[in-house]
Image (cartoon, rainbow, N blue to C red):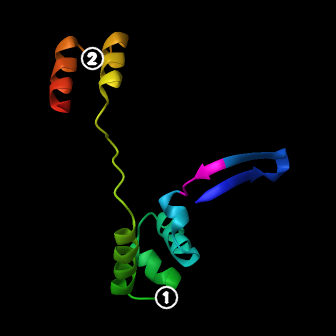
Amino acid sequence: MVERVRIAEKDIAIEGSFELPQLARLGLEDQVFITAFVRSHGSIKEMERVFGVSYPTIKARLTRIAGSLEFVETNPTPSKSEVLERLRRGDITAEDAIRVMEGLK
């Protein structure tokens, strides 16, 4: 848990209770590994070359890291107020709103 964030060059500090994002909670070596994986566009062959280890080693490490991360819902269920706001804006029809609201029960 982080309690203070400071931007030194702007002389700004924010205090409170902040939870670090999942990737920031990984150890430094795992952060470097994930960064390399993203930079290599997910190429395990490239990861083998960069780290000088075998395919099974790369896969095992990815599996271990993935197991330590929670799944992030990318399409969360909207709240009733969100559905009503979308209806008010005309983004959805009344029928769509009813169907979504019935699914929330």
Tell whether label 2 touches label 1 (CB within 8 Å).
Answer: no
Residue carrying label 2: 92
What residue appears at the point 31 percent right and 31 percent down from the top-left corner?
78
Q: Residue 44: give x, y in percent of width and height.
A: 39, 75
Please, what is the three-letter code of the amino acid marked with disc 2? Ile
Tag 2: Cα neighbours inside 10 Å, few (<14), some, or many (≥20)? some
Q: Which residues are magenta?
A: 16-20
> Residue 99 falls in which quadrant of the image?
top left
Q: Is residue 100 left or right of residue 34?
A: left
> Residue 57 falls in which quadrant of the image?
bottom left
The majority secondary structure of the magenta stretch comes to strand
What residue appears at the point 55 percent right and 58 percent down from the top-left corner?
20
Q: Which callout, 1 or 2, points to the residue nearer the camera?
A: 2
Q: Is residue 61 left or right of residue 39?
A: left
Residue carrying label 1: 52
Is residue 18 highlighted in magenta? yes
In front: 71, or 105? 105
Quadrant holding the C terminus: top left
In front: 78, or 105? 105
**Up/down of 96 relative to 37, above or below:** above
Q: Is residue 83 left or right of residue 32?
A: left
Q: Residue 23: give x, y in percent of width and height.
A: 50, 63
Whichever of labels 1 and 2 marks the residue nearer the N terminus, that label is 1
